[in-house]
Image (spheres, rainbow, N blue to C red):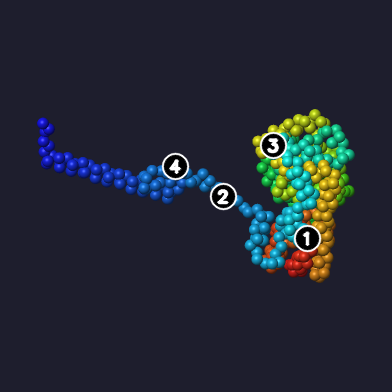
Amino acid sequence: MPTAVDPHRRRKKRACVLSLRFICSLFAFSVILRLDSTMSLLKSSKVISSIGTFSPSLGVLSTRNSSWWGGVQMGPPDPILGVSEAFKRDTSPKKMNLGVGAYRDDHGKPFVLDCVRKAEALISSKQLDKEYLAIGGLGDFTKSCALLALGADSEVLKSGRNITVQTISGTGSLCIGANFLSRFHSASRDVYLPKPSWGNHTPIFRGAGMQLKAYRYYDPSTCGFDFNGALDDISKMPEKSVIMLHACAHNPTGVDPKPEQWKEIADLVKKRDLLVFFDMAYQGFASGDIDRDAWAVRHFIEQGHNIVLSQSFAKNMGLYGERVGGFTVVCNDAEEAKRVESQLKILIRPMYSNPPMNGARIAATILNTPDLYKIWLEEVHGMANRIIKMREQLAANLKSEGSTHNWQHVIDQIGMFCFTGLKPEQVERLTKEFSVYMTKDGRISMAGVTSGNVGYLAHGIHAVTK
């Protein structure tokens, strides 16, 4: 028979259990309050920023770390993109964007070359595959790329002592070149850039670990080439240094040496035993003549310079978004070229493995199809001529406005960009009062000037310079 339980004893036991639960609850609540107080103190002293976040409801540290990138500072805005963004916000019907580095037709619209459209149709009709390209790129393109730059009579091409690889446009070509020099040009880490030079040259070479220096190039007093200053600085460069030369249509000034000046520069560079790095982003686009624009490159090679060369097809074929370029190294012989090629492939492989094919196919199709090549020569000549015509009209309109300044440099400069000589405060006025947008150094893209707005531009420039 079960033993009877004393009711008094059962009530006493229940009371003890309830008391114990109450004491535990008070203890737990006390712990939470203390932890919360401690975490608040840590937060106020910024110690918690390196630990995590506290959740009072859970009483534990959150596993989410919110400070991995706490030390990342806001970077400065891109000067060119900043111009475009300000232009977009402007509501003036007369606004002009002269900062963009892309060709526009006489209506201010993006222009796709007819030869490009035809090449795309031809490629599409072949129903080609989408397999990976080789590390060095599309063979038909790289051969044509080198031929375009060096010329059909080039001894370098005939002897096979060059290596050309396909790159991700001009920027990619420069990046490959800078990193190749960083690894293998052990004689010097110094790279001399013209002052001024394209803005991207500095971060590209600096990022590769090269030491950047400058030589005189642009003369603000004449808005032209400081030939004597350049020669003086080149004569003082340490032997084995690298010198950057713009093959044509110097960016940002539009100021190029004349052939006789190029000859003197080539002789002096050879005397100083400098390695020449040519940047040729505008072949054909500068003068309208592909051979004339490549003259300096070919002359240096003829004089015995084993140059390195960066090429871009963004401007002269309008393949901006296709990112088509090439990097060439001229070597002593074919055997050396093979060794250089092997190292370029090793350099490219971890960067992007292999280049994109579509733009290279377009460029190769144009360069290797006689009918399309002829159309391209006509179109690139037409683009260059429109730019030249706009230069002449701008100078003429400034004269008609009554300007007493000498604007001959607007005509004499060549290529997409013009260094107007405007001061920063004049640029600011031009933007505020006339909605004309350009970089603060007074550089304008002549591609943004049309027969419909050149008069308005001249009126604005005259107003801020008189």
For label 3, the SS is: loop
Residue 177 lies in quadrant: top right
Is the Cβ of the residue at disc 2 closer than 8 Å to that at disc 3?
A: no
Tag 2–tag 4 contact (CB < 8 Å): no
Residue at image location 73% in from the left, 36% down from the top: 136
Mark 2 = which residue?
A: 73
Q: Which residue has dot 1 on it?
A: 106
Query: Which residue shows up at 83% across the image and 33% down it?
Result: 160
- Work out how far the residue at label 2 is from the one at label 4, CA to CA, in angstroms: 24 Å
Specify which label sits upstream in the sequence, 1 or 3: 1
Which-is-in-front pick, marks 2 and 4? 4
Distance, label 4 to label 1, CA atoms, is: 59 Å
Which of discs 2 and 3 lies nearer the camera? The answer is: 3
In the picture, the quarter occupied by the C terminus is bottom right
Q: Earlier in the sequence, mark 4 or mark 1?
A: 4
Kind of residue at disc 4: Thr
Q: Amino acid at mark 3?
A: Tyr
Q: Is residue 126 visible?
A: yes
Q: Earlier in the sequence, mark 2 or mark 1?
A: 2
**SS for tag 2?**
loop
Q: CA distance from mark 2 to mark 3?
A: 38 Å
Residue displayed at 68% across by 35% down: 349
Residue to which mark 3 is pinned: 132
Q: Do the CB atoms of the residues marked 4 and 1 lie less than 8 Å apart?
A: no
Q: Position of residue 77 (x, y in %)?
A: 63, 54
**Do the residues under discs 2 and 1 have CB atoms within 8 angstroms?**
no
Q: Position of residue 34 (x, y in %)?
A: 34, 46
Count residues near mark 3 (Cα–Cα under 10 Å), then give few for <14, some for 14-19, many for 20+: few
**Along the line of sight, the residue nearer the viewer: 204 or 381:** 381
Q: Nearer the viewer, residue 265 or 376?
A: 376
